[in-house]
Image (spheres, grey):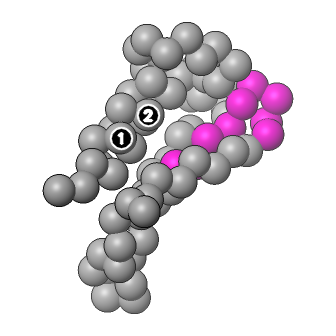
Amino acid sequence: MTYCDAIADKILNVFKFGSGGGIHMFPTLLECEKQNIDPIKLQLDLDERGCLNSYKKTITLTDYNGKKYKITIDRL
């Protein structure tokens, strides 16, 4: 059993809604809309047909200063 989906979901919820975690240097989804900041995005590892290549998930987010960050979740 792999937990990549559950881990990605937990991280996304913290950054999207500010639920727990105490990560205040990143805007929530609502703040992104108000301040014209790129919202958090989840990217799956898909092939050209749209089928999953792996369990890898990549989360991209932007801080209040406009700097972008990438979080990668993958099974080892």
Query: Which residue sits furthest left?
Result: 1
Tell me the residue that label 1 is attached to: 7
- SS for callout 2: helix
Marking on residue 51: none
Q: Is residue 68 left or right of residue 54?
A: right
Tell me the kind of residue under disc 1: Ile
Which of the 4 image quarters holds residue 17?
top left
Is residue 62 shown in magenta? yes
Q: Of residues 74 and 76, which is closer to you in this image?
A: 76
Contact between marks 1 and 2 (CB within 8 A): the answer is yes
Q: Magenta region: which residues?
A: 59-67
Q: Is residue 19 left or right of residue 34?
A: left
Where residue 22 appears, as percent x and y from the top left, is 55, 11
The N terminus lies in quadrant? bottom left
The residue at the point 57 percent across, 48 percent down is: 71
Marking on residue 11: 2
The residue at the point 64 percent across, 14 percent down is: 24
Tell me the kind of residue under disc 2: Ile
The residue at the point 46 percent across, 53 percent down is: 73
The residue at the point 43 percent across, 11 percent down is: 20
Q: Of residues 12 and 37, which is closer to you in this image?
A: 12
In the rendered view, tell whether residue 72 sits above or below residue 48: above
In the rendered view, tell whether residue 42 sits above or below residue 14: below
Q: Of residues 52 and 73, which is closer to you in this image?
A: 73
Neighbor class of circle 2 (other Cα within 10 Å; few <14, some 14-19, many 20+) is: some
